[in-house]
Image (spheres, rainbow, N blue to C red):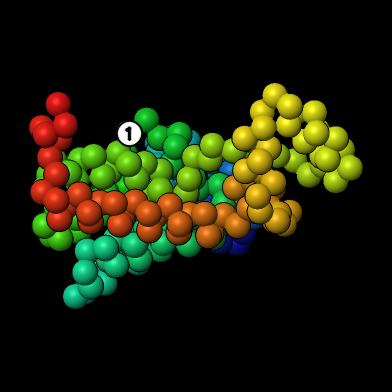
Amino acid sequence: MAQQADAGQRARLNRDRVLHAAVALADRVGIEALSMRSLAQELGVVPMALYKHVANKEQLLDGMVDVIVGEIDSPAHGADWKSAVRERILSARRALLRHPWASRVIESRSAPTPGALDYLDSVIGMFRAGGLSADLTHHVMHALGSRVWGFTQELFPASPNVDPDAQAVMFREMAARYPYIVEIAAARTHDGESVVNQGCDDQFEFEFAIDLLLDGFERLHRQGWTSADQS
């Protein structure tokens, strides 16, 4: 009877179920703990059953990226290009915040997945539909960088929690040699929950950068900017 139940479960296995189970498992235990063996155990099947749906761990990770990308909201109908792009990117950010491991997996892919290409094509299409030239849009996408996916490769990476007194001593020692770094680091009150730097409001910093970039893109578009004019 147990063998019949196992056979029935394996028969119900499909690629979609495998990928969604992998995402859920990574959410729960972390991407480092995800393996074909642990996923098979989660699904109640032997590891070989998974290879009918994903050829290897890399293909599994590719598929997981597409699951995450599938959570990004579609572009709003009728919105101007700036609003549409902004909301699309902020939706991507919400998706990545639900799956904190996802940005590392996206960065690790050697080539964009089909879902990632669909998403990028959609974002580029919003700029083009807004009247931005292909030339300007090319540079726009470079400027957005990882922000198009909803995360930022930070100039000041997060540091582990340190004792406030020890941090004060460190700041005093640094101030003589690196006065401007210390000045901006101390410019805002910090809370310990941020992923940008200890205490920086990462959501505010992300939206600040996106709005600054979009305003700049709009200004260049209105000026009829081309890269040929810069050479």
Q: Which residue is drawn at 70% across and 24% down?
A: 177
Nearer to us in this view, 19 or 51: 19
Q: Which residue is drawn at 53% across and 60% down?
A: 204
Could you tell me if residue 81 is visible in this image?
A: yes
Element class at badge 1: loop
Could you tell me if residue 32 is visible in this image?
A: no
Query: Is 129 left or right of 11, judged from the image as shown?
Result: left
Location of residue 123 by image quarter: bottom left
Spot the residue most to the top.
Answer: 177
Q: Residue at x 26, y 72 (%)?
A: 76
- Residue 53, horizontal then vertical, whole percent: 39, 45
- Residue 136, horizontal then vertical, whole percent: 17, 44
Q: Residues within 10 Å of mark 1 (few under 14, many from 20)?
A: few
Compared to residue 13, the image places residue 109 above or below, namely above
The residue where tag 1 is placed is 111
Location of residue 14 by image quarter: bottom left
